[in-house]
Structures are given as C-alpha cells and as structure tokens.
Amino acid sequence: MTSTTCFVTVGSTRFDALTNQILSDTTLVDLKKLGVATVIIQIGAGEFEKNRFEEVFGSSCDRDSGSTTFAGLRIEFYRYKPSIAGDLSKAKFVIGHAGAGTILECLRLKVPLVVVVNELLMDNHQVELASKMADLDHVLYCVPSDLSQTILDPRLFTLQPFSAPDMVKVARHIDGLMGVAN
C-alpha cells in the first residue's frame, strides 16, 4: 500500500513561515492533488498564525499537539518527539527545513524531500546545502512562498537516490590527509 502521508518538519527551531504555509488553502489543495490524506507537522518551537490555527483546529485545541480533519485532510501536529524516524519512514514525501540532519536522513531512507529554506536566517548555509542537493537531483528546494508550486513539480517522485560513499576510500583519504602510511 502506498503511503498517503506527508510529513513536515522544522527541526528544533522556529520556522513559522513554513508551518503556516502548510496550513494555507493553496497548499492544502495541492497536497490533496498529490493524493495526500494525512499531514503530520512537527512544529518545533514555532507557532501557527492564531486565526488560521483556530479555523483549522478549533479554539479548544492544545497549542503543543493536536489533530483534526480539515479541507478533506487529516492534519496532526506536535512540537517534539524523541525520534521522528517513524514519521519520516512512513511518509509518501517530506517537506522539511534545510537542516543537514533532516536532509541526510531523508536521503538515507530514500523518501522524496522538498527542502524549504528559511530566508530569515543570517549567514544562511542552508541555502548552499539545499542548492547543492537540488543540483544533484536529490531534493527539490524552495522558499515558503513557493512551496505549493514546488510540491507539484513532477520531478518530486523521480529524484535521484543518494549513494552512500565507499567508506574504505573515505578512510584512505583521511589517512592520507593525516600522514598515516597505508
């Protein structure tokens, strides 16, 4: 059975532009076009926009975790879990921040990934990582305002798998750099 879950993660930080974009009418409609039935959002330290939160989840919902059915989608959210590995592995695809850990874990699991770059970060090394992974056709990347059009990009489900490096070659290279004889 093909998964119909989209998992969204912001890591341990705050990325309200992403979490609020997920709840936009446009993005919810586009997720349904992709066959998504459930959206699970890990919001970290962030907050949803108050009025939209109440519209989607209702006024009685806890701000730390909750679930609802809205616009024909099951939508769940939480702040943190000890591990998000289960959410990553059961997802049809992942929408995530540009953290190296998130990117590498999705590549390892061979789960299609849309990397969303946080434009508000200064000295944003995340753009460099996301751009390089996209250049190699391992991920798609965008900024929050371009998320809807990016998730509809037909390349999302034909991205190139990431091949793990040959660790023997890596070890030899490090030995060479350190002056250790073979």
Image (cartoon, grey):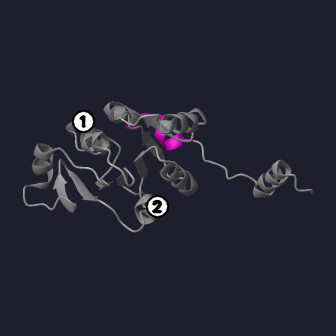
Q: Quadrant of residue 116?
A: top left
Mark 1 closeness class: few <14, some 14–19, many ≥20 residues within 10 Å: few
Q: Secondary structure at mark 2?
A: helix
Q: Is residue 29 above or below residue 168?
A: above
Q: Which residues are magenta?
A: 151-159
Toward the viewer: 38 or 64?
64
Q: Position of residue 143 (x, y in %)?
A: 38, 33
Q: Position of residue 130 (x, y in %)?
A: 51, 38
Instruction: Identify the residue shown where x is 40% and y is 34%.
Output: 150
Q: Any mark on residue 26, and which? A: 1
Q: Quadrant of the N terminus?
A: bottom left
Judged from this view, the residue extending furthest toward the left is 59
Q: How many marks?
A: 2
Judged from this view, the residue extending furthest toward the bottom is 82
- State left or right for residue 72 relative to residue 118: left
Q: Any mark on residue 43, and which? A: none
Kind of residue at disc 1: Thr
Q: Position of residue 171 (x, y in %)?
A: 79, 56
- State left or right for residue 118 relative to residue 126: left
Q: Is 156 included in the stretch rendered in magenta?
A: yes
Mark 2 closeness class: few <14, some 14–19, many ≥20 residues within 10 Å: some
Q: Any mark on residue 89, and which? A: 2
Kind of residue at disc 2: Ser
Of the image marks 2 and 1, the number of the one nearer the N terminus: 1
- State left or right for residue 77 relative to residue 84: left
Toward the viewer: 90 or 139?
139
Q: Is residue 123 above or below residue 59?
A: above
Instruction: Identify the residue shown where x is 32% and y is 50%.
Output: 36
